[in-house]
Amino acid sequence: MSYLYLLLALSFAVSALGWIYFIYFFSLGYGFTISVLSIATAIIFRDVITWPALLSCVVWLVFGLRLGMYLLLRERRSETYKHILYQPENTVKKPAVVMWSVWIMCALLYVGQISPVTFYLHNLREGLPVSEGWMWAGAIVAALGVIIEMVADAQKSAAKKVNARRFVDTGLYRIVRCPNYFGEVLMWTGSFIICFGSCCTVGQWVIAALGYIGIVYVMFSGARRLELRQMETYGNDPEFQAYTKKTPLILPLVPIYSVAKYKWLQA
């Protein structure tokens, strides 16, 4: 399991961006850590890497670099985002125990998220009868998730250029209110289902499951924060009220229209 220790060391090193500014643990640190882990996985297992495994690594690389660069540019260019980013609760210096706890949890989470592919490749190297079909299925689902996220972000950007003061309900936003979050959930779902064909041990299943559950929780927590901000901004708009009553929050066709009351989703 030495490869996991190496990936964990890299995860700690890159996610340490959060020590510069706390929110970076979850933003820049997240994106760039996933990018580095994708490259490291491809290098560590270069002797046995398969085409679908390589596709998964490329998907992570694209996702991570795009997220990290997007957040960097948005921080520099968007006054609205700066206002959100530098809210008092984000700028107050956190106690050391909080900083260390969050850093450790983030580093572990990011390794857990990408672990199914590493388990597949490790077990393949060990000669276990892994399934390339499951690997292809997971890689394709993950790629679809990234595409959905990219399209959603592009549609939101285009809509805001037309009317910056109005909520977005066009394109994918007609189907679900947070299609970018849905795309990310789909991407990590694709990663997780690889385990079904990877001959995983109990310990490997636990690591992968914790990584998957953790990121799904983070996505719903992010959707809750967005919902609360939108309620504050558009709550008195009858069109927005009608939109939120008929459009699911994050999962298409799943009738979850609000998670605002669930304080346990506050991350």
Image: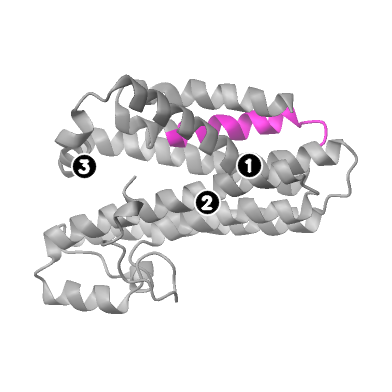
Depth order, front residue of 167/4: 4
- Where's residue 57, x and y in %? 63, 41
Which residue does the image show at 21% across and 42% down from the upper left? 81
In the image, what residue type sits under mark 1? Ile
Numbered label tally: 3
Residue 174, above or below 88: below
Magenta region, residue range: 30-48
Which residue position holds label 1? 207
Q: Position of residue 171 (x, y in %)?
A: 35, 69
Which circle, 2 or 3, is nearer the viewer?
2
Sequence-wise first label, 2 or 1: 1
Q: Is residue 151 among what the camera can see?
A: no
Q: Is residue 24 above or below residue 140?
A: above
Q: Residue furthest left?
A: 236
| Picture quadrant where residue 249 is located | bottom left
Q: Is residue 49 magenta?
A: no
State whether residue 90 is above or below residue 93.
below
Q: Is residue 258 left or right of residue 111?
A: left
At label 2, the amino acid type is Ile
Q: Which residue corresponds to the image point at 66% horizontal and 56% vertical from the top-left?
A: 193
Occupied quadrant, residue 234: bottom left
On the rendered image, what quadrant is the N terminus found in?
top right
Provide the residue designation for mark 2.
Answer: 213
Give the residue pinned by disc 3: 81
Query: Disc 3 on helix, strand or loop?
Result: helix
Amino acid, disc 3? Tyr
Disc number lying in front (1 or 3): 1
Please state the horizontal and vertical placement of residue 216, each as a whole percent of the image.
47, 53
Magenta: main secondary structure: helix
Residue 97 is at least partly visible in this image: yes
Residue at the spot 27% in from the left edge and 39% down from the top edge: 74
